[in-house]
């Protein structure tokens, strides 16, 4: 199939394998001399390990722990604070202490039950609120501050008509990827090959080089077909890879470690719970004079990627608004709970839930429709960002809003719902909006200073072209979209472009599959490589083209002062959601969902539609369905049915539209799309529920219990 328009949908590269069930995932692998691993995990939240007593291990069953690690005992991420195997202190329930390996999983599970570990238990910090109270050096994992001088804001506040203060809370969110975490280390005399479900091959390779204290040639990392990630397979697989690789080296066998759903839910990283505090000065008409935002993230027991998640949360703290005299500061605080980490949106969903809610509440005080109020503050091309960068490119938000007002019949619905609610005591209808953006690529100069992406195109003697990059398809469709970019540039049939699952022995480091960067950054490098190959093309000859990342200098980024252009480009979105709330049960029924997006140029219409539908389902569920709690340091939801992600009965067909606004530094004008589609769901559904009940909420998710409690309070206050 040759491609006239890059946006025209094509059959996905992995379509047949997936729908036929023939595609082998990591748990389907069987290799010679393979045994299984089961981890013994801490049953306490915080304490010292005094002694470990193992049961009598049958022949062929062995224990592997910290003493077997050839290199330093930490998972190489950002800070050196996450042990591969805890050998002195444990910091959360579920922290791995050692692994038993052997042929039979049933025997391994029985042996784990017979292990006796003695601990000296210490006082743990279980909640974000407890950590905020203590907010000292030992509890604070990261902090940043930027924006307007506090003294200037203080003088503005003194002359203000009123100061509004609000606190907003968001909870955990679980990734619910269809395929649980899994990793296999294949033992060979000269090298260890680690295969598994993953997003970031070179994160894993660097963690293994560190843990095994070995040379570059001694370790290979290969991605298996990956059944979903959403950020949950960004940093977490590095620890699992260290577990299996250390064990394989110690016992000289291949080691398979695969979690069942309950283990996966209890011990893997989650979206950070957050507390956001707003302090806003208003004049007599309700106009914003200044705003201060404080963000607290629950990091869990280890730093992981939390400092970068906090950066993203802060960069998004003003939403899509040009707010005068804005100041933001944020903290990641340590608790003795499961570490939190990467999740689609990476700090932005918490910030947008908070700022959209706060601006909506301010509009109520001013007695102005929320959308009208929001539009007064919308950023425009040329405006400064809150980090003293600039919105360089055209912004189509006003057109997108107008289009959605017309499509949804917003004003008419508002009137109809008010009338309906006056005459119906049990059921109430509401309509809510959200406006949002997402920065594409790594924060600041991250692509230039840290990632330094390289891509390769290989052409074989029979003129087949292969993509050699380290990026993972985890269901988002890059096997298809990146092949399309190269096919179009070379004017070759799409079917003839090959994209084998990446292997670090074969592919350069093109960076991790995160941060809505793959299509825009890696796709652009592939487009440039394909241009070169086209010029150099020699039929019947093996050829290789290498392309390196080149940084576009905008307003330089300063990591210390948090100033400059945080992103080279932004994608934009508008959501409108209609709901019906049953005031007797507190149940929320989704009725209609409308969505407009601007992602530059669409590389494949069907792939993007999948991102929109999936992302919005996740975002909406974060707002009202998915409820995960930790009690005394232990995650309470151990199954999908306990947790309650949306089913097909919860989500309605999504009416979406994408606006064309090509970006010069993206392939064919494309920007990032993967994270953007999640961000607007939660704030839009909150606004719709508030509209239906004529009340306000300061938390996510808004579960039936929260609704009933709010109605009870409202009736009590009015009575």
Image (cartoon, grey):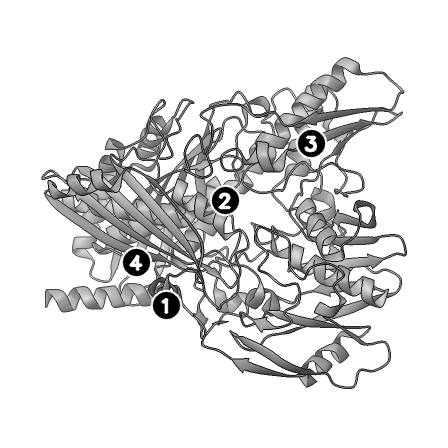
Asked if labels 2 and 1 touch by Cβ distance under 8 angstroms, the answer is: no
Local packing at callout 1 (Cα closer than 10 Å; few below 14, some 14-19, many 20+) is some
Residue 449 spot, x, y in % from top left: 58, 34
Element under label 3? strand
Q: Which residue is mark 2?
A: 613
Picture quadrant where residue 468 is located: top right
Q: Is residue 578 in view? A: no
Picture quadrant where residue 623 is located: bottom left
Asked if labels 3 and 1 touch by Cβ distance under 8 angstroms, the answer is: no
Q: Which residue is mark 3?
A: 454
Residue 146 spot, x, y in % from top left: 35, 40
Asked if labels 3 and 4 touch by Cβ distance under 8 angstroms, the answer is: no
- Figure check: 97 above or below 284: below
Q: Quadrant of the C terminus?
A: bottom left
Q: Which residue is mark 1?
A: 130
Whichever of callouts 3 and 2 sits on the residue coming sooner in the sequence is 3
Local packing at callout 2 (Cα closer than 10 Å; few below 14, some 14-19, many 20+) is many
Instruction: Measure how far apart labels 1 and 3 are at the Cα level.
Output: 44 Å
Q: Residue at x 60, y 38 (%)?
A: 450
In front: mark 2 or mark 4? 2
In front: mark 1 or mark 3? 1
Element under label 4? strand
Q: Which mark is residue 61?
A: none
Q: Quadrant of the N terminus?
A: top right
Local packing at callout 4 (Cα closer than 10 Å; few below 14, some 14-19, many 20+) is many
Whichever of callouts 4 and 1 sits on the residue coming sooner in the sequence is 1
Residue 475 spot, x, y in % from top left: 63, 45
Instruction: Measure how far apart labels 4 and 3 are at the Cα level.
Output: 51 Å
Residue 321 spot, x, y in % from top left: 31, 35
Q: Which residue is mark 4?
A: 581
Q: Nearer the viewer, residue 51 or 280?
A: 51
Q: Nearer the viewer, residue 568 or 229?
A: 568
């Amino acid at each position: 199939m040759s491609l006239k328009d890059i946006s025209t949908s094509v059959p996905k590269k992995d379509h047949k394998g997936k729908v036929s069930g023939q595609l082998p995932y990591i748990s389907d692998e069987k290799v010679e001399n393979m045994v299984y691993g089961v981890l013994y995990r801490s049953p306490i939240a915080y304490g010292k390990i005094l002694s470990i007593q193992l049961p009598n291990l049958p022949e062929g069953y062995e224990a592997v722990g910290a003493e077997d690690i050839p290199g330093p005992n930490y998972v190489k991420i950002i800070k050196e604070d996450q042990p591969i195997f805890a050998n002195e202190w444990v910091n959360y329930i579920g922290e791995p202490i050692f692994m038993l390996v052997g042929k039979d999983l049933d025997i391994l599970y029985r042996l784990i039950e017979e292990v006796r570990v003695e601990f000296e238990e210490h006082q743990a910090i279980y909640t974000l609120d407890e950590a905020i109270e203590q907010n000292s050096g030992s509890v604070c994992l990261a902090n940043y501050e930027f924006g307007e001088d506090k003294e200037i804001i203080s003088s503005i506040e003194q002359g203000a008509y009123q100061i509004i203060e609000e606190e907003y809370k968001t909870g955990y969110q679980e990734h619910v990827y269809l395929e649980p975490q899994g990793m296999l280390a294949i033992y060979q005399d000269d090298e260890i090959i680690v295969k598994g479900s993953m997003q970031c091959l070179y994160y894993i390779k660097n963690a293994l080089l560190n843990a095994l204290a070995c040379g570059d040639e001694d370790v290979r990392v290969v991605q298996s077909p990956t059944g979903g990630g959403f950020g949950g397979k960004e940093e977490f697989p590095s620890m699992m890879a260290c577990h299996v690789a250390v064990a394989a080296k110690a016992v000289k066998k291949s080691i398979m470690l695969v979690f069942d759903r309950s283990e996966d839910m209890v011990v893997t990283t989650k979206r950070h719970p957050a507390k956001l505090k707003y302090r806003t000065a208003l004049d007599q008409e309700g106009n914003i004079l200044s705003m201060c935002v404080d963000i607290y993230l629950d990091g869990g027991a280890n730093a992981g990627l939390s400092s970068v998640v906090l950066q993203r949360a802060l960069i998004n703290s003003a939403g899509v608004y040009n707010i005068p005299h804005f100041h933001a500061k944020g903290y990641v605080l340590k608790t003795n709970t499961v570490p939190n980490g990467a999740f689609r949106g990476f700090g932005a969903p918490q910030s947008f839930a908070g700022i959209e809610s706060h601006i909506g509440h301010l509009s109520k005080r001013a007695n102005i429709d929320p959308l009208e109020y929001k539009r007064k503050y919308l950023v425009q091309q040329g405006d400064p960002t809150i980090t003293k960068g600039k919105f360089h490119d055209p912004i189509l938000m006003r057109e997108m809003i107008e289009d959605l007002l017309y499509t949804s019949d917003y004003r008419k619905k508002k009137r109809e719902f008010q009338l309906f609610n006056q005459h119906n005591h049990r059921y109430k209808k509401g309509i809510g909006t959200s406006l949002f953006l997402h920065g594409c690529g790594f924060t600041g100069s991250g692509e230039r200073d840290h990632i330094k992406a390289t891509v390769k195109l290989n052409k074989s003697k029979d003129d087949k072209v292969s993509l050699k990059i380290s990026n993972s398809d985890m269901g988002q469709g890059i096997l298809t979209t990146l092949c399309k970019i190269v096919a179009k540039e070379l004017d070759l049939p799409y079917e003839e472009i090959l994209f084998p699952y990446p292997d670090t022995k074969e592919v350069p480091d093109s960076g991790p599959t995160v941060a809505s960067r793959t299509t825009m950054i890696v796709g652009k490098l592939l487009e440039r490589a394909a241009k070169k190959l086209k010029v150099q093309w020699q039929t019947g000859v093996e050829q290789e083209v290498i392309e390196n990342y080149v940084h576009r200098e905008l307003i330089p980024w300063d990591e210390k002062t948090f100033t400059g252009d945080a992103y080279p480009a932004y994608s934009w979105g508008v959501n409108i959601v209609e709901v019906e709330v049953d005031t007797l049960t507190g149940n929320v029924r989704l009725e209609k969902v409308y969505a407009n997006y601007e992602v530059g140029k669409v590389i494949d219409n069907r792939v993007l539609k999948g991102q929109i539908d999936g992302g919005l389902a996740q975002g909406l569920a974060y707002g009202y369905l998915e409820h995960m709690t930790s009690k005394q340091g232990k995650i309470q939801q151990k199954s999908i049915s306990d947790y309650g992600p949306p089913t097909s009965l919860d989500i309605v067909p999504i009416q979406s539209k994408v606006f064309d606004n090509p970006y010069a530094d993206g392939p064919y004008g494309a920007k990032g799309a993967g994270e953007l589609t999640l961000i607007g769901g939660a704030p839009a559904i909150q606004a719709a529920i508030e509209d239906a009940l004529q009340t306000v909420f300061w938390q996510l998710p808004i579960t039936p219990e929260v609704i009933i409690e709010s109605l009870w309070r409202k009736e009590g206050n009015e009575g």
